[in-house]
Image (cartoon, rainbow, N blue to C red):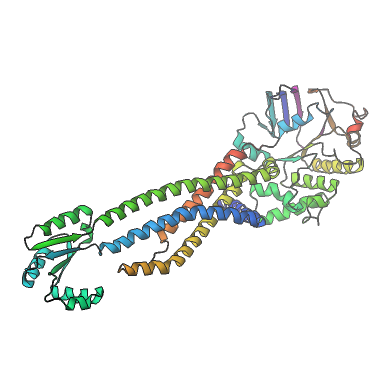
């Protein structure tokens, strides 16, 4: 068979499938909606995890350590300690916050201005504000950094809040598994929906299939339009899922930005990346095609002209 | 063109439809296959079209033994065969044109050629101008002619017809049979199963008579209609 003949046949099958889907708009839309929702759910969950991940990447800079020096330590000593700490690997930045500045800041943000005026002297110590480098912000790295500072005789308290980082990472790991489970289950759902839709269409067109086989239609010829139908369902469902994702991102964008700002972050919600879309469309097409193929393989061979 | 050698066919339910049947039909010949209902006429046609396989013996069509033909080669085999059915098996939701075009579409013919050939086939059965009508909008005789147009559209060297006039009145039946004769006149081999003795007499072609799955030897064509009540008259 020549290539052009094959091309004509594929074009015919594709157009035929599109035409039939158009003739039953309600059924087609409902099927597409089911597939779209089934694809959108794991994709949305995945998108959430990706966002949470990059948001904490943003928080990675927010993971910091406050090293409170003992109250008698002079500022020059504090500067010297800071210089020493900067030389240590795993540290991105060390800022010295002198006691006076700390007090100024506290007065500005706490609202205790009047009470502070009553104080004779500045009760605050000098503080080193330490930001670990991004590649050294695991829980273990942070603990060793903490021990490093705590060992200095000039240091009073090292304050580090790693608990939430650990918990957050654990939650992300759970969510990642959930995405996987949802994707597998809903993918199976898409297979079933497409398979069943194709099965019904095959039964509806039993007479046509018989006649086609009688006049010399091969199994591949008879199967082709059904495979295209499955493929179209997959693509259509993916388009729908994409629209759902973009809408969700649009709706969530403003509150998420507000939330991020409250945490001192410039983070903005990310829509589906090209990679996410590739997985979405690839998955949708593969599932649609496979569902149709399984159904066609099972049901077409039972239809033989007699 | 068709060669049956000691062919027997037993269906899975145990019924022996054909027993030791041998005959041959030459290229360009037109032959009637007659006998009562259940005599095995349909089984002979099904063996030719490879809708069934013989239990014993060999069926050769167009110089090729069908017993060695693998299932995946059957579609290509059927494209060299025109089949006409009593119930014409037209697709009710497709216009006449699409129905007739089906064998060409299946074979992957270019659109231009499909258009040309479908019109030629419809012209041969005097239905040109009714391409866009649905089968239900046509008379029974016209529907059967659409079925014949579909069988000849790909210019097969062999046409088989199973009771093609079963639902037609005598006049229309004769008209349809004359159509088949015209195809045979231009070199197409035609095998028609019928129990309409009137037609067999009228066309004066060779007759193979089956009774209880066995060949009865050529009849003289002058015997009376064995089952007149089965011929639907309108």
Name above or below for residue A133 compared with residue B103.
Answer: below
Name above or below for residue A266 compared with residue A205.
Answer: below
Q: For this rendering, which residue is in front, A125 or A262? A: A125
Residue A305 placement, left or right of A140:
right
Name above or below for residue B76 compared with residue A44.
Answer: above
Q: Would residue B199 be seen by someone viewing this image from the given angle?
A: yes
Q: Main secondary structure of the magenta part?
A: strand
Q: For this rendering, which residue is in front, B16 or A266? A: A266
Q: Would residue A87 be seen by someone viewing this image from the given angle?
A: no
Residue A240 on image: x %, y %? 53, 59
Choose top left, top right, bottom left or bottom right for residue B75.
Answer: top right
Q: For this rendering, which residue is in front, B30 or A130? A: A130
Residue B29 is a magenta residue: yes
Residue A130 is a magenta residue: no
Choose top left, top right, bottom left or bottom right for residue A219.
Answer: top right
Residue B135 on image: x %, y %? 79, 50
Q: Residue at x 58, y 42 (%)?
A: A295
Quadrant holding the C terminus of chain A: top right
Q: For this rendering, which residue is in front, A163 or A20? A: A163
Residue B142 on image: x %, y %? 83, 48
Residue A32 placement, left or right of B88:
left
Magenta residues, as a range?
B16-33
Number of marks present in the image shown: 0
Q: Residue at x 72, y 29 (%)?
A: B3
Residue B178 on image: x %, y %? 86, 42
Residue A218 placement, left or right of A260:
right
């Amino acid at each position: 068979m020549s290539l052009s003949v094959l091309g004509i046949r594929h074009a015919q099958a594709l157009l035929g499938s599109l035409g039939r889907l158009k003739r039953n708009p309600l059924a087609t839309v409902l099927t597409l909606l089911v597939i779209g929702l089934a694809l959108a759910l794991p994709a949305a969950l995945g998108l959430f995890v990706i966002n949470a991940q990059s948001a904490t990447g943003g928080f990675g800079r927010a993971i910091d350590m406050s090293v409170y020096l003992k109250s008698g330590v002079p500022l020059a000593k504090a500067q010297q300690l800071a210089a020493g700490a900067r030389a240590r690997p795993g540290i991105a930045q060390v800022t010295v916050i002198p006691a006076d500045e700390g007090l100024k800041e506290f007065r500005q943000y706490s609202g205790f201005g009047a009470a502070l005026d009553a104080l004779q002297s500045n009760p605050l110590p000098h503080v080193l504000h330490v930001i670990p480098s991004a590649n050294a912000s695991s829980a273990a790295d942070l603990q060793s950094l903490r021990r490093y500072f705590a060992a200095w005789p000039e240091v009073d308290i090292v304050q580090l809040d790693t608990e939430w980082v650990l918990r957050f990472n654990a939650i992300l790991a759970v969510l990642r598994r959930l995405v996987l489970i949802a994707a597998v289950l809903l993918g199976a759902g898409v297979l079933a929906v497409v398979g069943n839709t194709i099965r019904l269409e095959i039964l509806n067109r039993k007479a046509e299939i018989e006649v086609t086989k009688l006049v010399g239609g091969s199994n591949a010829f008879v199967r082709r339009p059904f495979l295209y139908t499955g493929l179209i369902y997959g693509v259509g469902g993916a388009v729908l899922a994409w629209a759902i994702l973009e809408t969700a991102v649009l709706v969530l964008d403003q509150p998420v930005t507000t939330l991020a700002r409250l945490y001192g972050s410039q983070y903005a919600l990310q829509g589906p990346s090209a990679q996410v879309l590739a997985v979405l469309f690839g998955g949708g097409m593969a599932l649609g095609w496979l569902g149709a193929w399984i159904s066609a393989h099972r049901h077409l061979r039972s239809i033989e002209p007699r | 063109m068709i060669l049956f050698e000691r062919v027997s066919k037993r269906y899975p339910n145990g019924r022996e439809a054909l027993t030791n049947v041998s005959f041959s039909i030459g290229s360009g010949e037109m032959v009637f296959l007659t006998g009562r209902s259940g005599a095995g006429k349909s089984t002979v046609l099904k063996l030719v079209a490879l809708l069934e396989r013989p239990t014993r013996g060999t069926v050769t069509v167009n110089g090729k033994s069908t017993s060695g033909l693998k299932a995946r080669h059957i579609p290509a085999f059927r494209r060299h065969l025109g089949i006409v059915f009593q119930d014409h098996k037209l697709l009710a939701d497709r216009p006449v044109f699409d129905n007739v075009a089906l064998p060409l579409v299946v074979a992957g013919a270019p659109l231009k050629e499909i258009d040309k050939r479908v019109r030629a086939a419809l012209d041969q059965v005097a239905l040109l101008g009714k391409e866009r009508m649905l089968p239900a909008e046509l008379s029974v005789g016209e529907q059967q002619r659409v079925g014949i147009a579909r069988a000849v559209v790909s210019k097969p060297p062999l046409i088989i017809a199973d009771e093609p006039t079963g639902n037609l009145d005598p006049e229309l039946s004769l008209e349809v049979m004359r159509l088949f004769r015209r195809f045979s006149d231009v070199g197409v081999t035609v095998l028609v199963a019928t129990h309409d003795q009137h037609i067999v007499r009228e066309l004066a072609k060779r007759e193979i008579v089956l009774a209880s799955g066995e060949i009865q030897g050529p009849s003289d064509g002058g015997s009376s209609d064995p089952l007149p009540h089965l011929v639907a008259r309108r």
